[in-house]
Amino acid sequence: MDLHFNQNLAIGYHSGSQISRVITEDWVARNMFCPVCGAPVLGHYEANKPVADFFCDDCQSDFELKSRKSKNATIEHKIADGAYATMIERITSLRNPHLFVMTYADWKVNNLLMIPNYFFVPDIIEKRKPLAETNRRAGWVGCYIEIGDIPESGKIFIIRNSRQEDKSRVVDQYQRSLSLRKAEIGSRGWLMDVLKCLERIPDDNFRLDEVYAFADELQLKHPDNNHIHDKIRQQLQFLRDKGFVQFISPGKYCKIR
Ligand SMILES: [Zn+2]
């Protein structure tokens, strides 16, 4: 994989966002394999297709590309996306494409990661302020995606700090994450919440009461649920069944990476 963009493509464009779109989409079209099934190339949708930018002919997956020029090595930022209401509707019905997030600087890719669509929950979508009356699209409400709020198991790196990850590792990681796919938005939300809590426990070995320590926080997010502890144990059982957590002894667990 050559991490450099084709700079010639920028000739004739004046707007930074147009240049960014042209050079990053060209790079993906020339270099990117399908992280879902490992097919060697992705197809590029015609410009201005509203839903996705790339597709895999072999497994029928769709991908959207969001990129950002940034010297910063980290990718823990929020990125602007389309209309808020459409985004919420799509993620709720799992009709959103998988997301590629790219950061680049000096005409080359620094980071590229893929976030499977089943890691999207309304919590990570932030509503933007409506566009001002002076704007051509006055009143339109866009959204941000909070990349930092997505659990680590949902961030599949293809390039990290200018280094390419092994392709088979990328596909394996996707396949592993696939076992966490929940179609129903409420249970997907609970799973993401508990995954994020586990990530905040620094040690791989942890006790049930360390997870219960997040109960007040979870109660605020789920005010109508009166069985927070039961819900936590239910998610831990699910994660055990899917091979992400091991039960050591009553009340004692271990994360499996
Ligand atoms: Zn594929």
Image (spheres, helix red, strand yellow):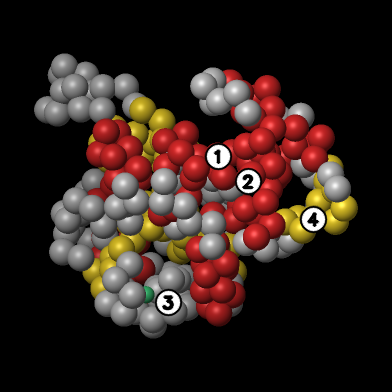
For the residues labelled 3 and 4, the Cα–Cα distance comes to 31 Å
Please determine whether, in this image, residue 116 is positioned above or below residue 235: below
Confirm if mark 3 falls within 8 A of ligand 1.
yes
**Disc 4 to disc 2: CB gap under 8 Å:** no
For the residues labelled 3 and 2, the Cα–Cα distance comes to 28 Å
Q: What residue type is labelled 1?
A: Trp
Which residue has dot 4 on it? 247
Closer to the chain start, of discs 3 and 4, is 3
Q: Which amino acid does label 3 sit on?
A: Cys
Image quarter where ligand 1 lies: bottom left
In the image: residue 231, left or right of residue 158: right
Q: Please rate how many residues cluster around mark 2, counting C-alpha atoms within 10 Å: few if below 14, some from 14 to 19, many from 20.
A: some
The residue lying at 67 percent from left, 63 percent from top is: 243
Front in this rendered view, residue 225 or 89: 225
**Disc 2 to disc 1: CB gap under 8 Å:** yes
Please determine whether, in this image, residue 232 is positioned above or below residue 8: above
Which residue has dot 2 on it? 235
Confirm if mark 2 falls within 8 A of ligand 1.
no
Which residue has dot 1 on it? 190
